[in-house]
Amino acid sequence: MDRYSEITNKNQREIVLLKSFPCVWGKCSFCDYILDNSKSEEEINKLNFKVLENITGKYKVLEVINSGSCFELPKATLDKIKDIIKDKNIEKLFLESHWSYKNKIQDMREYFEIPITFKIGVESFDYDFRNNFLNKNAKFKSVEELKTYFDSPCMMVGIKGQTKEMIDKDMDIVLNNFDHATINVFVNNTSDIKRDDEIVNWFVDKYKDLLDKNPNIEVLYNNTDFGVGE
């Protein structure tokens, strides 16, 4: 498991994949990422402290991800991140959270005292597909409601059951409403959700050049493209 990397193309930054307590929701139909968690606070902090030693601050920007939301990281790990931010003169932070924690987002912004780009796994702006098929439990009703709390949607493309029309609409929303977004091309995993190669090929043909040239949109054609995970 690779837990430290550097993103050197768009939005240059260091990134760490930390261990956390179990995801507050943990029921998304497509996700097996939550297997990377623990109920042992000692185990979590021991591993996280070792991973965090890699941070140099060379880009002044840090992204912290884990198998769920940043709110599931132990207090000691959060304190360690805050110390590193000060010691390494980091000026911007990327974090991710589930919709369930929306009312705690501002508390985390105030805790770290530097600008934070808050990501959220939206996967699709189609309400029914997002909540009933993917079982995201992210029941916001509008883009405006989402933007009240979060800065950067993480989208998913290439799932059987997803249509070209849905993806076109999602890309239009992302490109016209957000300063940053991540597009994840679905890769088969241990879940029952399956990749639709025809949709993936269509998406790549239609959008790759546009998105690759957009400095604000990061596309993960494989789930390890950020250099962390396995």
Image (cartoon, helix red, strand yellow):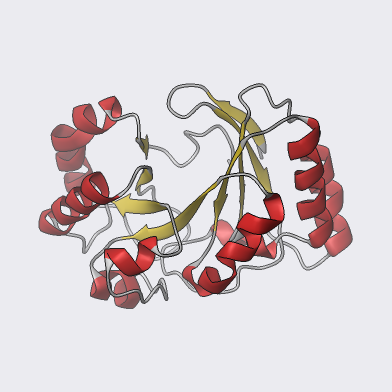
Q: Along the line of sight, which residue is nearer the eye, 10 or 188?
A: 10
Does residue 58 appear to the left or right of 175 in the view shown?
right
Residue ID at (21%, 47%): 176
Where's residue 146, x and y in %?
37, 65
For the residue pair 201 and 123, the one nearer the viewer reads as 123
Taking the image as shown, residue 26 lies to the left or right of residue 88, namely: left
- Could you say where residue 215 lies in the image, as x and y percent from the top left? 34, 29
Farthest residue, direction left: 165
Q: Where's residue 194, x and y in %?
A: 32, 58
Q: Nearer the viewer, residue 78 or 130?
A: 78
Drawn side of residue 230 relative to residue 223, left or right = right
Residue located 73% across and 38% down the image: 85
The residue depicted at 66 percent of the width and 21 percent of the height is 58
| Residue 36 visible in the current orientation | no
Looking at the image, residue 184 lies above or below residue 10 = below
Q: Residue 166 in the image: x percent, y percent? A: 16, 59
Which image quarter holds the N terminus?
A: top right
Residue at 45% across / 54% down in the picture? 189
Would you say 206 lies left or right of 19 here?
A: left
